[in-house]
Image: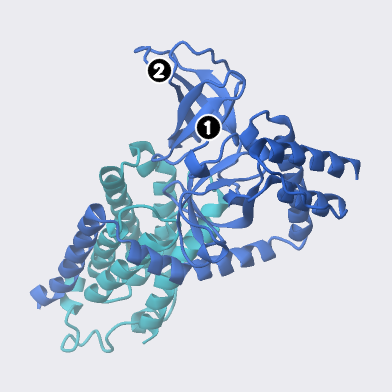
Chain colours: A cyan, B blue
Amino acid sequence: MKAVVLSVLVVLLAPVLQVAVVNGLSLPGGGPDVVLVAVIALAALLRPGAGAFLGFAAGLAADVAPPADHTIGRLALVMCLAGWVCARVTADGAAGRRAAVAAVVALGATLAGGVLAALLDGTPWGTALAPGAVAWTVGLAALVAAALALLPRRRSFGRVPRSRDGSRDRYGRGRRLA
Amino acid sequence: MRASGRRVPVLLALASAALIAADTVTPLEPLRAFGSAVFGGLEDAASAGVRWASGEHRVAELERENARLRADLLAARRTIPSPAQADGYRVVSAHVIGFGRDGTVTVDTGSDAGVTRDMTVFDGDGLVGRILRSGPGTATVQLATASGASIGARLEGSREVGLVTGVPEHGLLRLSLLNASAEVKPGDRVVTLGSRDMRPYVPDVPIGTVVTVEPAPDALTRTALVRPFARFTALDLVTVVLGPLPDAAAVDASAAESEAGSEAGGEAGGGDADAAKSGEKNQKKAKGA
């Protein structure tokens, strides 16, 4: 329930935060993609299917939230995969491991998004893969993932209860192996 | 188990690909309209919150800026010799409430205020861009520096005609003059050429100054890099041109009224030349008052 509420909040507020606050700050190098960071951070606490759905919804929201003028579905595709990968790969690991996973997923998603932007919308490669924006996103994703992992209640949060039992958790084994 | 775990992401990825394909074939305007209806209000609120948090002196600052804009507008009408400029425009002012990554911004005025696509947007410094689409309370503006933008332009001094396109990497614009032997030098001012029915661009809005003239290998056109007047990363208050006024006297009268607080009779000019003349008269009146 808590996870659903948080997911809805991310879908509704992250694109707004992005366009109304972060992009307006004119940070050096472009600023982070907070929608992607939010998806990565929250998907790590969800089951893979839910993570993928969260990514899809948030990406679609970022695709249609007003100033956007790119092909609809571009961010939905990238973030859906990012949410799914992040939910699958993130084990009950330490903060460092979670941060590393988040950073790698953020890097991959940003690069994939940049390539799609250049191919689908004719964005110049220099803008689509701006190193400053990539660095901001990767850094912030790692930071947020580490911070969430250090929160004491992460284990019981948004998961199937008794996840250690194995009998009720469909993804428990796969997750631990991954 | 594994297969069912993968079904959701695969379906969603396919749905995304289908959206991409559909949007490439026919633009999904209803979806964008839905987006602007849902997120427009939220952005408006968030941006208002940011503005409120950044200090109470904002109102005074904006009032000053507003006064400066009016003054600039009047000055521009007075100095530029083009007859089109003597006509007033029906305008609506708006705040920029969201910055996109696609060379676009959101403004907090929309179809409620009569804003529709292909209207000119400028601010106190110069041309900002044109309205790309409008929702109920917000509209999306394509900046002049966007990679897809192209604007008819001319050099203010020599009246040579050209095309301005965006060079988004460096925040610069590229001017391609149609006349390959045209004289152009750094420091020349570039203004809009103006379009039919004033859409998407009204004439003689300042765009920027030429910074470097590029060597022309093909010599078919003459190109130069232009630094825009508008600061696209720090946009705040902008003006959207809704259309021409029915007669020029009224706008000058209303400008005079609000500038000097004097009551100015709106004498309706007959023809275009008449309208320009009476506009001038009213401006003088405003100066006198």
Residue at point 77%, 52% (across, down): B266
| Subunit of label 1 | B
Q: Which mark is residue B168?
A: none
Task: Give the Cα separation between the discs numbered 1 and 2.
Answer: 17 Å
Q: Which mark is residue B221?
A: 2
Q: Are dots 1 and 2 in contact, CB under 8 Å?
A: no
Residue A18 position, x and y percent, is 48, 60
In front here: B73 or A51? Answer: B73
| Subunit of label 2 | B
Q: How many marks?
A: 2
Q: In the rendered view, tell whether residue B47 sits above or below residue A6.
A: above
Q: In the rendered view, tell whether residue A35 sits above or below residue A170.
A: above
Q: In the rendered view, tell whether residue A37 sits above or below residue A121.
A: below
- The quarter of the picture where residue B21 lies is bottom left
Mark 2: secondary structure? loop
Residue at point 86%, 42% (across, down): B285
In front here: A153 or B138? Answer: B138
User: Which quadrant holds the C terminus of chain B?
Assistant: top right
Residue at point 30%, 61% (across, down): B28
- The quarter of the picture where residue A159 lies is bottom left
Q: Viewed as shown, does residue A63 lie left or right of A132? A: left
Q: Can I make out residue A111 in this image?
A: yes
Residue B57 position, x and y percent, is 78, 59
Q: Can I make out residue B237 in this image?
A: no
- The quarter of the picture where residue A45 lies is bottom left
Asked if labels 1 and 2 share a chain, the reply is: yes
Tag 1 residue: B193
Mark 1: secondary structure? loop
| Residue type at tag 1 | Leu
Residue A29 position, x and y percent, is 48, 43
Q: Viewed as shown, does residue B57 lie left or right of B160? A: right
In front here: A64 or A115? Answer: A64
